[in-house]
Amino acid sequence: MDRLAQAIADARARYVSLNPRSQAADREAERSLPGGNTRSVLFFEPFPLTMVAGEGAEVTDLDGHTYVDFVGEFSAGLFGHSNETIKTAVHEALDTGVAMGGQTRFERELGSLLCERFPSIEKIRFCNSGTEANLMALAAALAMTGRDKVLVFGGAYHGGVLKFPAGGSPLNVPYDFVLGEYNDVEGTAELIRGAADELAAVLVEPLLGAGGNIPGSREFLDMLRRETREAGALLIFDEVKTSRLGPAGLQGLWGIEPDLTSLGKYIGGGMPTGAFGGCAEIMERFNPKKEGSWGHAGTFNNNVCSMAAGCAAMGRVYTPERAAEFFESSEAFRISLNEMFEEREVPMRCNGMGSIFAIQFSPRPIRKTADITVENQSLRPLLHMELLLAGVSVCGRGDMFVSLPMTETHLSKARLALESFADRYKSLILDIVGQAPQS
Ligand SMILES: Cc1ncc(COP(=O)(O)O)c(C=O)c1O
């Protein structure tokens, strides 16, 4: 067995011996759920933990261990597990009735908060998830333009039926996708021009999340805006995750107005929701008061608990001012981790922006998906196990989401765990991914 395989096996053996109850629960779950799982992204070897409680920025598992929660429900957990303002709003909503089959004040208020917040969103509609938001944005783009092709980027994840890993996905919706390379300015401009009058939309995350948390360059995003306009195609920003980066998401930071935006995750204060919105000309096609409008139904589109939680979360907790401060403080934390890796001359880096980043093993900056090598990825299971063993829960692929209730104590715990990982495995990491750059 090579050194890495041995190190992973050792860490997993420690994990197994510490988590007998989670292991038994996983076996029990296998009886009804394939592999014990109903959310692929939560699976990891040898078995995932069963969580039983969450409080503030911490979660506790079935065997009684407590972790600082950097999984952060893949960004939906921005508010942590026990925000009082959100809890109260949900309790009050439950008391008013949850399935009234009518319009309520909640979707009106949340809709108005989001339209005020994101200048490109003149009108908005709610749905049940980020996946659905993207599906609806794409459906609207195809109907609006009368065209069929959709440009997406390798490595992107826009939902369970809209994912574009290397090797493709057999489960995608059967749209006519054209695949571009993220951050390739020239190549993508050519693809857009080449597809021209067949291209309905470009669907893009302004920071390629699941594909490695690679920030889109300014030049790349500006080019997308310019070229889509030129081609008569719609630009759809998937800001399901990134809209929490600053007061108006990355579109606000870069001053770029997409035609449509999809939202989800944290905007429901931790409850299930999604939304798509954009310029009035497109969104007004959904206006049921107009002849020939497009129907868009959905039993839970305006679910009372989700809408009430969203109103509290976006109106009273994550105000634009709080979002601006949080972006600054979490970006400072991310940069401090990178400085720590540099001081140690270990080729590790936190790729991303603000409160959304991923630990990557690479001697070079990661700007394209091709920069994320097989060697880089081979170290992820070891990092993940060792951090869990140190009481820090991160995503299996190395993503970390900073949440609002995290204190200096939580951040220090993560910093220390990463420091000791870097010290303990420095020579192994160097052997696998190469030398850190000389500064
Ligand atoms: C960028 C992006 N878009 C869309 C989605 C899908 O959202 P949901 O899981 O709510 O369907 C995700 C989920 O991780 C995402 O990261």
Image: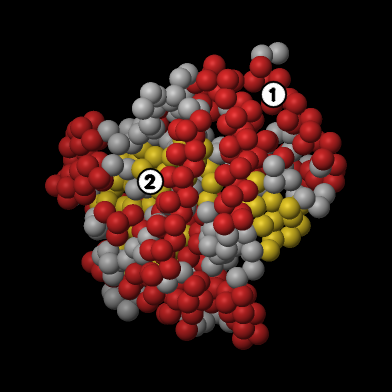
Comes first in the chain, label 2 or label 1: 1
Relative side of 46 to 351, left or right: right
For the residue carrying disc 2, how many other residues have a C-alpha within 10 Å: few (<14), some (14-19), or many (20+)? many
Furthest residue in direction bottom, as rendered:
96
**Residue identified by numbered label 2:** 207
Residue at (27% x, 67% y) in the render? 119
Q: CA distance from mark 2 to mark 1?
A: 32 Å
**Residue identified by numbered label 1:** 7
Relative side of 94 to 102, left or right: right
Please tell me the numbered disc located at residue 283. none
Q: Looking at the picture, how far across and down is residue 287, in whole percent?
A: 33, 73
- Is residue 384 positioned above or below 414 on the image? above
Q: Amino acid at mark 2?
A: Leu
Q: Nearer the viewer, residue 364 or 346?
A: 346
Does residue 70 show up?
Answer: no
Residue at (64% x, 28% y) in the render? 424
Q: Which quarter of the figure has residue 396? A: top right
Relative side of 379 to 52, left or right: left
Q: Are marks 2 and 1 in contact (CB under 8 Å)?
A: no
Please name the colour scheme applied to the rendered image. secondary structure
For the residue carrying disc 1, how many other residues have a C-alpha within 10 Å: few (<14), some (14-19), or many (20+)? some
What is the quadrant of the C terminus in the image?
Answer: top left
- Is residue 193 positioned above or below 404 on the image? above
* Mark 1 residue element: helix
Q: Amino acid at mark 1?
A: Ala
* Mark 2 residue element: strand
Mark 1 CB within 8 Å of ligand 1: no
